[in-house]
Amino acid sequence: MTTSTAYDIEEVARRARAARRFMAERGIRGRWTNACLVDRALAKGIDVSATSRGRVRVRQSGRSYRFHNGATDFNHPLASRIARYKEVSSALLLSRGISAPRNAIFEAGHGARAWRWAEALAPLVLKPSNANQGKMVHVGITDRAEFLKVFDSIASSYGRVLVEQFVAGVEHRVAVVNSRVVAATRRVPAHVIGDGTSNVDALIEAKNRTRQDPRNLIHQQLSIDDLALRELQRQNLDVHSIPGAGQTVYLRSTSNIHTGGDAVDATDDLTPSEVRFVERAARSFPGLRLAGFDVLLPRLGNGKQPHILEINASPMISMHHYPAEGKSRDVAGRLLDAMFPPGHNRAAGE
């Protein structure tokens, strides 16, 4: 594995804000993931402009690509489409002997049929088949009554429900460019850590204050909602409980950054066999040149082998550039090197 270059987070945040100003002056939409690409393109002398829809356009020596929030025409459309359908991509991986959880999608009103299919696979994960950013994800369901209640709740808002086998492991987002691993982030669910004297509500307020630091560009404020209260109840806690010093209290069962999770750089933690596993999975999708693989890895006794949980063809690369902990990884730079490889200027006659 050749990983992306590491940078100081304070310098990265300064450059990102400069890139955002550049974008605003030229009518380029988007936030920090777009700013990552713009910043690195300017540093490499690549022309940056806005498309008619306010997307990023990068151009050099006759080559041109569009980019917006991780989506790019550097990817083949068919590969992106396959990755978008989780049940299709999981089936493809399983057919090639690559570990992935079994799943299926059911229409609203088919909760009983879904339970009959899934009962033997419990514990289960239920979530909308067409939502993102960790919305309405329910993990660890084993009881039929709870399953049907959650199924109907998701179906009433989104229509179709994805039912999936729960697989143990610690979730990582692994960035892949041209089937090569370039960075990895361990995503930690929204949480606070007890100090032995403060209640959960006060710990949340304290963590939210730290997230107002100008170096924090992507991490969201924590909040107490129904999902957080449900997760606290699972731990026999509520907002008035006082956790012990060092005790981790989770507010979500899923680790999405948009629901308050932390991005922790884990690029150097991947073993060679884990890198090979992800790169083999990436090669199963020809034309998918930029992707984020959600991978469950065995860590600290949690899980036994790697599994590919999901594939994102429009990955949030900013989590690798602006982690809550660890080194900033230059995924955007590696993507631009793949788009405009060394020697392409000579090939264009320059």
Image: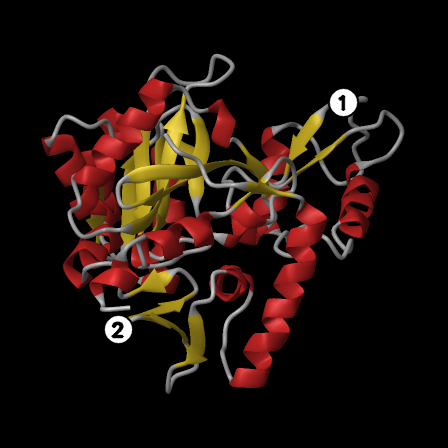
Q: Which residue is drawn at the image coordinates 35% and 28% (left, top)?
A: 123
Closer to the chain start, of discs 1 and 2, is: 2
- Three-letter code for the amino acid on which mark 1 is drawn: Gly
Q: Nearer the viewer, residue 57 or 193?
A: 57
Q: Can you name the residue that lies furthest to the left here?
A: 95
Residue 52 rendering spot, x and y as whole percentages: 37, 87
Number of other residues with Cα within 10 Å of mark 1, as a class: few under 14, some 14 to 19, many 20 or more: few
Return the residue found at the far right: 197
What's the residue at 22%, 53% (across, down)?
85
Residue at image point 19% right, 39% down? 283
Along the line of sight, the residue nearer the viewer: 68 or 247: 68
Location of residue 181 (image quadrant):
top left
Quarter in which the N terminus is drawn = top left
Q: Which mark is residue 62?
A: 2
* Residue ID for mark 1: 246
Residue at figure coordinates x 27%, y 33% from the top left: 279
- Residue 195 pos. (x, y %): 84, 27
**Label 2 near label 1: C-beta < 8 Å?**
no
Describe the element under mark 1 as helix, strand or loop.
loop
Q: Position of residue 147 (x, y in %)?
A: 36, 40
Q: Residue furthest bottom?
A: 52
- State how far apart marks 1 and 2 are (Cα): 56 Å
Q: Nearer the viewer, mark 1 or mark 2?
A: 2
Residue 331 in view, yes or no: yes
Along the line of sight, the residue nearer the viewer: 23 or 294:
23
Q: Amino acid at mark 2?
A: Gly
- 102 sits to left or right of 339: left
